[in-house]
Image (tube, rainbow, N blue to C red):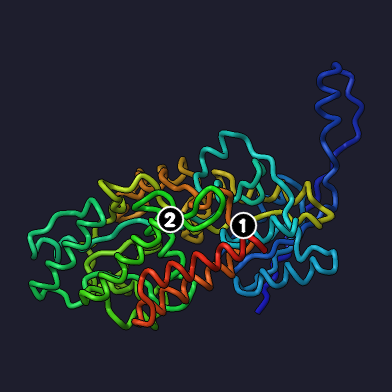
Amino acid sequence: MKRKFWVTTFLTLSGILVLTGCSKEKNEGTVKENKNQEITFMIPDWGVPPQSMLAEFEKEKGIKVNIETVSWDDIRNKIAIAASGNKAAADVFEVDWSWIGEFEDAQWLEPIELSQEDIKDIPSISTFIVNDRVLAVPYANDFRIGYYNKVIYQQAGLDEPQTWNDVMKDMEILKEKNILKYPYTFPLNANEATTTSFIWLTYLRDGKVFNDDGTLNRENALTTLNFINDMLKKGLINPANLTLNGLDTYRQILSKDAAFMVGPTSFIARSVDPDQSKAIGEIEVILPPGKDSKATQTMALTEAVGVSSLSENKEAAKEFVKWYTSKETQKAFFKEISAIPTRTSVLNEVIDAGEIKNSGAMKETSILVKSPFPNGVPAYYAEMSNSIYNAINSMASGNLTPEEAVNQIDSKIQELIKD
């Protein structure tokens, strides 16, 4: 269902002749008349700005914004169909982190100029920078962070895990002591959540998932697959995860059916919500474990907005993107729609103000966000993801060994690179 907010503004720039010096004349000469400018913005419902904020934008910039609310699943197709006719689906639209390679390859995005200060303030923007060009700007944060149930851990005399070997040992102890039947949770279904979980697990522990030429780092990938397979063979992961969606596997930490996971930042708020969590006051939010100590990098699955290269209103669209992702707007978004800020400065501010309950290691983890793709997200990501999650699901089902699974993934990626 589409929802439209029509926001009308009118800004009149007078044509006054300025006689106060060349410098002032030059500066004023760069100002363009915004009268009757209009842009369209295609976004899922969770990213729609409140009308009060849009009214503030139109008052300040004099740009009419037509918002079209479209489901996340439909946006990519709408953009592709419109582009095939050499038209923009919207002047500004949602850009998921996983689409950036395809969109860049198809040249659907107009580069956006940001200051180095802004770029440094948004760690997850690294995913959206291709060939030193910013192609989209993140607006909603979602990086991978650790969670463990301290009460369950204390029952077994365990401390916060530092490494993935610690996690394995801790899960074995919880199982042996009959404290939990399936103490670890991890997505295993044949869908995108399994692919991203494979990528972040490899990235957190070994720091490299893909080689500089885009091929799979077989050694690190095999270590991850062996870890998952061992967890399954030891009965530490619920077999139901083979068919559950990603969110339902993560909810096992809230129901106290699991004691540890790495998962989305949204579970920080879920963990203290009595309507969702049975473990209020028990879940600690921590830096994810790494190979020999805590992880030194993490992965973000970030939502961004970009400007269509086919837009006829590029400058106004860029002005909107900069406003939409500014510090002031992110502060307001957090209060109005609970969007976790992508800017480190704003995230720190709301955490320090106590506006995020049970934030734990959120600040420390947020600055570790980097892209696991050395050359940016590839244009063939969707096909690669399909190969990864199907191979892992087959392995988890007992149909492939870890070696066979890594061979299947590696061969597919090499094939995609050649094509």
> Can you tell which quarter of the image residue 407 is in?
bottom left
In-front residue for pair 309/351? 309
| Label 2 crowd (10 A; few <14 / some 14-19 / many >=20) | many
- Calculate the distance from the C-alpha at mark 1 to the C-alpha at mark 2: 29 Å
Residue type, numbered disc 1:
Ser
Helix, strand, or loop for circle 1?
helix
For residue 364, above or below residue 6: above
Helix, strand, or loop for circle 2?
loop
Image quadrant where one finds the N terminus:
bottom right
> Could one spot residue 48 in this view of the protein?
no
Q: Where is residue 231 drawn, in percent x and y?
A: 25, 70
Q: Disc 2 designates what residue? A: 143
In this view, the mark in front (1 or 2): 2
For residue 414, above or below residue 244: above
Residue type, numbered disc 2:
Phe
In the image: residue 33, left or right of residue 382: right
Q: Earlier in the sequence, mark 1 or mark 2?
A: 1
For residue 186, above or below residue 305: below
Q: Disc 1 designates what residue? A: 52
> Could one spot residue 261 in this view of the protein?
yes
